[in-house]
């Protein structure tokens, strides 16, 4: 594999291994009270990290976003990033996953996590942090995930209808309407910010960095995948270095391309086994909101690269622990 992939995949599996180790400890030991308290403390840490992210991005608007490339082009940003404890690229993705769970506790949690009004303010606060991090795919995914979570299980049919209707409407509306709307929205952001660049129609901008530009990498990856679909691009001396390297921004498709069908199915089997063991901890209602969190993770992987320690910690440790807080509250009373 390309060296970039080797490093990223080893880091991803290392983070996954650590998260599953902690998950296994709590499941085997049945230390549900400790698990619940750990997750509640994690919410406080998430809040502090979010606050420091706002402070850091007020000083330098792109510091959180540039953590994705380890500040190679602007090394002085790393000093600000480390000094403030700013949330990075993975932190923004993890926020997407926690929105459905916070909304679940707002609607059904009996104030076992935080007072309902504080939880509502916390959701608004985290969405603002998401805007400050300036990863447009995260902002868009968060907006959709929050909407679906608010509609809930009873209105799942309504959610599907709204999504389909929005998609059809989006196709029918003239392109110039979007252009005018996006340009107007870009005026609310700093001209030096990434959000301004994403929203403003700029013919000189790097199209490959936009969501549309990333989607165009699917054909590039498919070209490499079709050459060795069974065992993947990493199984031979490939001539598709450029296509596979640039396609690294698409998590699921890039993994399918480099590992092939066999390797990718094994990867999915591992994730499915872990998620299945986590789902056994929840009641039916919580499972619905946890599945929305998983959906956010999957959607982000279709749009960009995902992984890192934050996503695994959120999905396998923090969120399951938050499902146990009502039980902790009841045991404390007894």
Image (cartoon, rainbow, N blue to C red):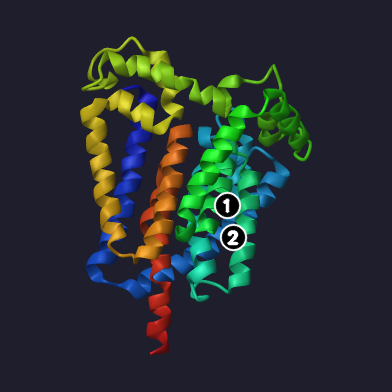
**Rendered residue at 55%/72% (across/down):** 114
Q: Where does the image place residue 112, in percent across and percent down from the top left?
A: 49, 75
Query: Mark 2, mark 1: which one is toward the viewer?
Result: 2
Measure the C-alpha gap from mark 2 to mark 1.
9 Å
Image height check: is 167 above or below 37?
Answer: above
Which numbered dot is residue 48? 2
Relative image position of residue 13 (x, y in whole percent) = 31, 42
Pointer 1 residue: 85
Nearer-the-camera pick, 31 or 119: 119
Q: Is residue 200 visible?
A: no
Q: At which x and y percent is residue 65?
A: 59, 38
Quadrant where the C terminus lies?
Answer: bottom left
Work out whether 190 lies above or below 173: below
Report the front residue among 17 and 283. 283
Judged left or right of residue 290, residue 211 is: right
Q: Is residue 23 visible?
A: yes
Q: Residue furthest top?
A: 239
Left or right of 134 in this view: 202:
right
Q: Is residue 290 left or right of residue 183?
A: left
Residue at image coords 78%, 34%: 184
């Amino acid at each position: 594999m390309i060296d970039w992939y080797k490093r990223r995949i080893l880091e991803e599996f290392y983070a996954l291994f650590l998260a599953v180790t902690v998950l296994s400890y709590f499941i085997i030991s049945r230390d549900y009270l400790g698990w619940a308290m750990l997750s509640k403390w994690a919410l406080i840490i998430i809040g502090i990290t979010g606050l420091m992210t706002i402070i850091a991005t007020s000083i330098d608007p792109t510091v959180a976003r540039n953590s994705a490339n380890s500040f190679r082009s602007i090394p002085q940003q790393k000093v600000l990033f480390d000094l403030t404890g700013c949330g990075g690229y993975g932190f923004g993705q993890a926020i997407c996953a926690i929105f459905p769970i916070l909304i679940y506790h707002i609607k059904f949690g009996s104030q076992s996590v935080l007072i309902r009004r504080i939880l509502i303010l916390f959701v608004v606060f985290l969405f603002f942090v998401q805007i400050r991090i300036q990863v447009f795919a995260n902002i868009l995914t968060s907006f959709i995930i929050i909407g679906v979570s608010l509609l809930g299980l009873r209105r799942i049919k309504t959610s599907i209808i709204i999504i389909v209707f929005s998609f059809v409407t989006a196709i029918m509306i003239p392109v110039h309407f979007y252009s005018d709307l996006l340009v107007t929205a870009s005026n609310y952001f700093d001209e030096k910010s990434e959000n301004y660049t994403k929203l403003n129609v700029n013919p000189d901008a790097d199209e490959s960095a936009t969501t549309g530009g990333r989607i165009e990498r699917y054909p590039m990856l498919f070209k490499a995948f079709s050459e060795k679909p069974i065992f993947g691009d990493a199984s031979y001396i490939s001539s598709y270095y450029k296509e596979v390297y640039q396609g690294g921004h698409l998590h699921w498709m890039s993994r399918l391309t480099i590992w092939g069908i066999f390797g990718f199915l094994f990867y999915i089997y591992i994730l499915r086994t872990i998620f299945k063991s986590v789902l056994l901890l929840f009641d039916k209602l919580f499972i619905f909101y946890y599945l929305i969190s998983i959906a956010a993770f999957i959607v982000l992987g279709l749009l960009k690269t995902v992984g890192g320690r934050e996503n695994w910690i959120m999905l396998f440790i923090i969120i399951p622990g938050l499902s146990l807080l009502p039980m902790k509250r009841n045991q404390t009373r007894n």
